[in-house]
Image (tube, grey):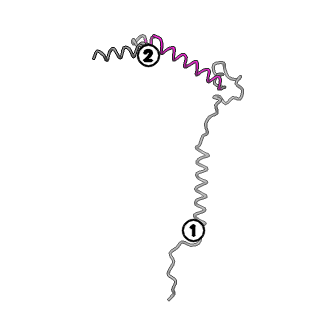
Amino acid sequence: MSTNPPSSSFPQRAPVVTAFLVLVGIAIFAWFVRRYYHPARPVNPLALSNPADFSADLRWKTTSDGRARHLADLRAHEAAAAATYGWVDEKKGVVRIPIQRAMELIVEENAKK
C-alpha cells in the first residue's frame, strides 16, 4: 500500500481557467460600461462652439454670467410676485396675495377657532 492519500484537488489547470474567466468577466463589464454609460451633456445646450450662433433668446445660456443674470432676474420677478396682489386664474376666482397678508389672515382665522 502507498502512504499517499488519494487527492481530490483540481488539476493544475484550475488557476489558468480562473484567470481566463476573470479576464472574460472584466471584458464583459468593460463592454457593458462602454455600451450603456452616457457621460453628462456639455454645458453648451446646443453643442455649438460659437455663442453668436444662438438666437438672442437663447444666448444667455452660453455663459455663466448670462445664466447668473437670468437667475437674478427670475428671483426678482418671483419676489415681486410674492409681494403683490394679482390673479392666478380669474375664471376660477384664484388670486395671489402678499405672503405677509396671507399669514395675517391665517392667524385671524385660527384665532376665531
Main SS of the magenta segment? helix
Residue depicted at x 48% and y 15%: 82
Image coordinates of residue 8 in percent, x first then y, are: 50, 75
Residue 46 image position (x, y, % from top left): 65, 28
Assess whether mark 2 and mark 1 are in contact (beta carbons under 8 angstroms). Answer: no
> Considering the numbered disc 1 on the image, is that residue within a helix, a strand or a loop?
helix
- Specify the amino acid type for callout 1: Ala
Residue positioned most to the left: 113
| Mark 1 vs mark 2: in front | 2
For the C terminus, the image quarter is: top left
The one of 64 and 19 positioned closer to us in this rendering: 64
Task: Give the magenta part as a residue range.
Answer: 64-89
Can you identify the residue that label 1 sits on? 14
In the foreground, 27 or 88: 88
Q: Residues within 10 Å of mark 2 (few under 14, many from 20)?
A: some
Q: Which residue is mark 2?
A: 99
Residue depicted at 62% across the width and 34% down the height: 41
Q: Residue 25 — which label? A: none
Q: Is residue 76 magenta?
A: yes
